[in-house]
Image (cartoon, rainbow, N blue to C red):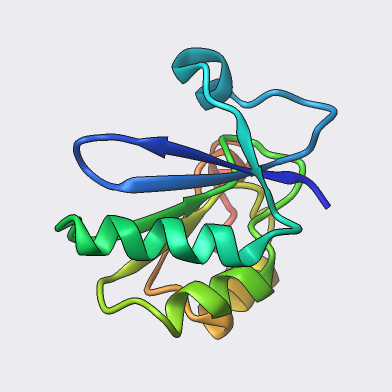
Amino acid sequence: MGKVEHRKSGRSDCCRNSGTENQTAVARVSQTNPMPSENPEAILHTAQAGEMLGKKLIYLEAGSGALNCVPSEIIKLVSQNIHVPLIVGGGIRDKSGIQKAYDSGADIVVIGTAFENDFNFFD
């Protein structure tokens, strides 16, 4: 499994699942280190801390064009233990990936690169 990267911003707490073989744009720009996806409790606690600090949503994000998406187990764990909307994005390449994220508990799924690469993605 890849790593999940945490970034604090003024809008939301962001977690990114990035393969160790590729650095995401967020890692380069924010100079943050990934949180290991092998430690889902740390990811959950980070999301819960964001909620307790008044964040209005949590964004689990694998990164633009990521090789791996946020694991379903992490989406499910976080969604079952927070009370704000959960947005999931990055690494989702097809409609089944969208459905899997929703089925795992995402309230909103973000599609970027897949749609940019194929304008008929939703046909």
Q: Quadrant of the C terminus?
A: bottom right
| Residue 103 percent coordinates (x, y) | 56, 84
Residue 107 quadrant? bottom left
Is residue 53 depicted above or below 7 in this figure?
below
The residue drawn where x is 51% and y is 78% is 102
| Residue 65 percent coordinates (x, y) | 64, 36
The residue drawn where x is 28% and y is 47% is 12
On the picture, is 24 further left or further right than 1? left
| Residue 108 percent coordinates (x, y) | 38, 67
Between 31 and 95, which is closer to the camera in this rendering?
A: 31
Is residue 30 depicted above or below 56 in this figure?
above
Residue 94 quadrant? bottom right
The residue drawn where x is 68% and y is 39% is 66
Is residue 63 depicted above or below 97 in this figure?
above
| Residue 11 percent coordinates (x, y) | 21, 42
On the picture, is 14 further left or further right than 32? left
Is residue 96 depicted above or below 116 in this figure?
below
Total marks shown come to: 0
